[in-house]
Image: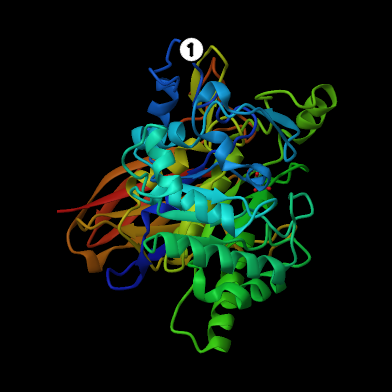
């Protein structure tokens, strides 16, 4: 058995974990809304048409914030279409996904859904085909108490109390040629500055997220962040990061190392934010919102086929990636990476939540079930609140296609406000178990409460409606604690959650 060691110290902290790093995302895309969270007539539908079975899975997942309504969709969206009498809301062609949006679910309905789910709404405004004026208007509509055109319109539409939406995205992926209303960094930075300024004049309690690059692979990555922040540094609070990974060649060791790319991406954006801070002699620090992350590649060919057959369809089954076991391992390493950067990453959204590159799947008229990636997310959201700890890890390493020195044991630890420690750990070794020693001496007397472990012999194994627990967490082999040092067995190729309780 291979060996690895971890040293933790209760005083060596990365920082407080903002619960919003366990956010997710619902876009008006595919079957995320229609056939996902909403399906009137379904046996599980509530009085508003929202599926109770989906809601149950969302609540168990633990998602404190949900980004909405896009995504690429938002760059052609008129928010006014989504409020008021539902029977007279317009049907619109959505040029992001070449489908038809009926606006049957809009702002009021989504806010009700999010309230039931226990989630805050992170609302994205359209800075593609629209600008600061409509941004100002939607903030007035959503957050102003009463006595103005848009707040009174909200009241007339049935919501006496303001929605109190605190977090706003200033557009989406505005650097991308696929985006409606793509802009240069300077153009976007200027518009984002004006929009954010006016939105905050309407409601000074809100926070705004400026669009960073749509991926670290964009040719303008780096320059985009720098140039757009030069325009809007003083009026925004966060910069967004988006990143999706895939394994089209079946290279599992290379795929599992992709969280190293994410780590570098975060560090680079932090450096750029701080460089702009330096040039401005500013006291303000811009933090990060990693508001789109996931694995996305399984459905690409299927989507091309759907679009060949059906352009402008409603609620087409787009981006329906079926996740396998190795995807869950990478999702685990991504969560570990986000926690390692908890001092600067304050918001993150697993993209997305239901049906569209999602941890939760549904069948129209049928069941709802959890995909493999659901479990690492649920564990992190449930057990890793409080403080992120510096996790000194001594692990054997491997080299792969894109990276050298990839640690076989990828781990991070958190300390709850009650003094309990949770260790998250991925064993990237395809064949060998590890004996992992965790030095917990600085925490006083601890006992090992639980070892949750997820493994499957087949990296391509998936969950389905018929077999929803094919890839499913179980009790791990655990271990013992002796004189403040825990020794735990970590099976080959596995996701692990080890919970230590203070005695
Ligand atoms: O999440 C799917 C899409 O990915 C989003 O609409 C867009 O922002 C990104 O390119």
* Mark 1 CB lies closer than 8 A to ligand 1: no
Which residue is painted at 44% across and 63% down in the image?
A: 200
Q: SS for tag 1?
A: loop
Q: Nearer the viewer, residue 474 or 47?
A: 47
Q: Residue furthest right?
A: 308
Q: Nearer the viewer, residue 207 or 88?
A: 88
Indicate the quadrant where residue 51 lies.
top left
Q: How many badges with numbers are in the image?
A: 1
Which residue is painted at 75% across and 61% down in the image?
A: 218
Residue 281 appears in the rendering: yes
Q: Nearer the viewer, residue 485 or 97?
A: 97
- Counting from the top left corner in percent of width and height, residue 140 is at 44, 51
> 164 above or below 469?
below
- Counting from the top left corner in percent of width and height, residue 154 is at 41, 39
Residue 61 appears in the rendering: no
Disc 1 packing (10 Å; few <14; some 14–19; many ≥20): some
> Is 298 positioned to the left or the right of 198 in the image?
right
- Counting from the top left corner in percent of width and height, residue 186 is at 70, 72
Which residue is painted at 57% across and 24% down in the image?
A: 88
Q: Nearer the viewer, residue 271 or 497?
A: 271
> Is 232 positioned to the left or the right of 100 in the image?
left
Which residue is painted at 67% across and 55% down in the image?
A: 173
Circle 1 is placed at which residue position? Answer: 42
> 450 above or below 256?
above
Q: Residue furthest left?
A: 503
Indicate the quadrant where residue 399 lies.
bottom right
- Counting from the top left corner in percent of width and height, residue 260 is at 61, 61
Quarter of the render that holds ligand 1:
top right
- Colouring convention used in this rendered image of the protein: rainbow
């Amino acid at each position: 058995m291979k060996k690895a060691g971890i040293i933790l110290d209760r005083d060596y902290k990365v920082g407080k974990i903002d619960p919003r790093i366990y956010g997710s995302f619902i876009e008006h895309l595919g079957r995320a809304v229609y056939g996902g969270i909403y399906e009137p007539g379904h046996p599980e539908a509530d009085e508003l048409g929202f599926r109770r079975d989906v809601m149950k899975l969302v609540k168990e997942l633990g998602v404190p914030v949900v980004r909405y309504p896009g995504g690429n969709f938002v760059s052609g969206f008129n928010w006014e279409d989504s409020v008021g009498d539902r029977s007279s809301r317009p049907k619109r062609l959505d040029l992001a996904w070449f489908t038809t949006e009926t606006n049957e679910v809009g702002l009021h309905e989504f806010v009700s859904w999010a309230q039931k789910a226990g989630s805050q709404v992170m609302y994205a405004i359209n800075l593609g085909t629209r600008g600061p004026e409509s941004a100002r208007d939607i903030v007035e509509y959503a957050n102003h108490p009463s006595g103005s055109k848009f707040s009174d319109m909200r009241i007339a539409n049935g919501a006496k109390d303001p929605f109190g939406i605190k977090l706003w995205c200033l557009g989406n992926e505005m650097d991308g040629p696929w985006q409606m209303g793509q802009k240069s960094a300077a153009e976007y930075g200027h518009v984002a500055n004006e929009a954010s300024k006016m939105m905050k004049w309407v409601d000074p309690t809100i926070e705004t997220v400026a669009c960073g690059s749509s991926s670290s692979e964009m040719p303008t990555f780096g320059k985009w962040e720098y140039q757009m922040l030069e325009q809007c540094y003083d009026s925004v609070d966060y910069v967004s990061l988006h990143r999706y990974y895939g394994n089209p060649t079946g290279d599992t060791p290379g795929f599992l190392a992709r969280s190293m790319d994410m780590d570098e991406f975060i560090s680079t954006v932090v450096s750029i934010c701080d460089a702009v801070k330096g040039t401005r002699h500013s006291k303000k620090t811009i933090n990060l919102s990693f508001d789109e992350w996931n694995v996305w590649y399984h459905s690409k060919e299927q989507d091309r086929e759907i679009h060949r057959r059906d352009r402008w369809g409603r609620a087409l089954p787009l981006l329906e990636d079926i996740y396998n076991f190795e995807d869950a391992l990478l999702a685990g390493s991504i969560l570990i990476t986000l926690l390692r950067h908890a001092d600067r990453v304050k918001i993150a959204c697993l993209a997305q939540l239901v049906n569209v590159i999602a941890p939760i799947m549904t069948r129209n008229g049928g069941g709802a079930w959890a995909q493999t990636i659901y479990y690492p997310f649920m564990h992190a959201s449930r057990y890793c609140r409080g403080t992120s700890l510096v996790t000194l890890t001594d692990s054997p390493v491997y080299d792969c296609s894109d990276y050298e020195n990839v640690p076989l044991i990828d781990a991070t630890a958190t300390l709850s406000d009650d003094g309990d420690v949770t260790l998250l750990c991925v064993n990237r070794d395809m064949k060998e178990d590890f004996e992992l020693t965790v030095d917990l001496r600085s925490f006083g007397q601890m006992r090992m409460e639980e070892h949750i472990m997820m493994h499957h012999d087949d990296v391509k194994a998936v969950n389905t409606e018929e077999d929803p627990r094919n890839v499913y967490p179980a009790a791990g082999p655990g271990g013992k604690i002796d004189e403040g040092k825990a020794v735990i067995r970590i099976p080959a190729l596995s996701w692990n959650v080890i919970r230590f309780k203070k005695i």
